[in-house]
Image (cartoon, rainbow, N blue to C red):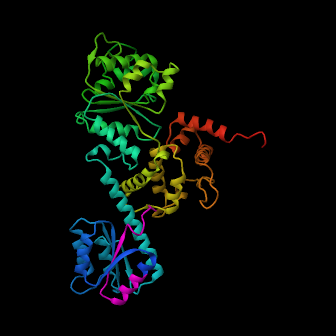
Amino acid sequence: MLNTTSNEIKLFLLDDSDTDLALMEMYAKNCGFSFSSFTDPFVALEKIHEYPNPCLLISDISMPNLDGFEIMKRLNLSPNNCLVLFISGQRDIEFPIQAMRMGALDYIPKPINIKSFDARIRKAMENLSARYELQTVKDQIFSGRSFDTFVGQSESIKNVFSIIMRVSSFDSTVLITGESGVGKERVARAIHERSPRASKEFVAVNCASLPENLIESELFGYSKGSFTGAEKDSVGLFQVAHEGTIFLDEIAELPLHLQAKLLRVLQEKEIRPVGAKKSVKIDIRVICATHRNLEELVINRQFREDLYFRLNVIPIHVPPLRERRQDLKSLVPFFMERLNSKWGLEKSVSPELWKFFDYYNFPGNVRELENMLERAYILSRNKIISNQDLLLQPGRKAVEGTFFNLDQNLPSLKEIELSYVREVIKRSQTKDEAAQTLAIGRKTLYRKEFEIDQFFAPTKND
């Protein structure tokens, strides 16, 4: 559950029965909740509208002057952070049906059973907490489409937001660095969508996924007859991005001879298709990204120094999720809300799963978190997603040894991460399947395998 304390969410108690109201007051007092109680619905509504923070109204339905349904209507007419839970002695089945249709969170029959009442109040508080957290996320997102899928509240991400806002209006080349899955392409799209080029094309190219013998023709195009099969002229991706933005992901994988050609494109603002005799002028903004250390590649002569300095005009580093765990409070409710909207369900994350997220190292970063939640959301049979749903796949059990009892001595974060990766590899039929489950690239998977061998290698004393 989100770390929302009882002081952050207030209870408003409304009942024309002094006995029932006293019972609810005693419950709220014993639980340490902040609360206000009323017998007059008009006074209660006035205080709720004045209250700026999230609150939960626990109200009787059948009251003189103003019944619970009319209260719901008046609450829905003005924006507020108040959810409603009804209690009623009415046995008519139409009452709870009408209450739910109007948006009530729950319906509890009288006489009040304290044990059941407590469980449903806490569930309601958790629901309100999640909604409030999501609204906080939305308030933090800058206006416009640019940050709709790139959220966070940590200082490091706020710094990334700030840089995006400052550089979007300029055409300078941007180099985005960070591990696989941190959201580098989302940063690039945010820059493009806030720029004067927003109405033009945003062309994303993964340099690592293009066959080396086709990269040049894909990027720069080719002329008819320049090679076997070139039956007509073809424009490259740079020309497709004319007047827009081209995003070159995994720029470190670009072969050296094409690095020289890219340098010329950046300097001269023109490209020459394969087999062509003339160059073609282009007007584009170039944004690049990599998870590798380009400075080390330059030292090892695997990346051109002049190109590195030409690309690194405006550097933006996106830190891994494990270094900004505060963003989980924004990301998890954000992804869960998207899933709930997409599938029409109302699922949430269990407190145990939140604890697991606090300790898990997320080798696949935000992309892994998103994939984990979607997989667990679809495969979970309950409305509350538990840690056992995370790795569940058809015909398989959750990975043993991945989730730990938090009351015992915990292993290091590195051991949790590598144990998780090792178990996924063991249970996957192919490396591609393992990489897909982990939401990481194959190169990252091979690096993790090497780390596993080193970390779990037997010592001489074993």
In what quadrant of the picture does the C terminus appear? top right
Where residue 85 appears, as percent x and y from the top left, is 35, 75
Q: Residue at x 48, y 55 (%)?
A: 376
Where residue 442 appears, as percent x and y from the top left, is 53, 35
The quadrant in which residue 237 appears is top left
Q: Is residue 319 above or below residue 4?
A: above
The segment highlighted magenta reads: 1-26
Where residue 49 appears, as percent x and y from the top left, is 24, 70
- Report if residue 230 is visible in the image: no
- Of residues 449 and 344, which is closer to you in this image? 449
Q: Residue at x 26, y 78 (%)?
A: 44
Where residue 332 appears, as percent x and y from the top left, is 42, 54
Is 9 within the magenta? yes
Is 245 within the magenta? no
Q: Is residue 25 above or below residue 34?
A: below
Q: Residue at x 24, y 65 (%)?
A: 79
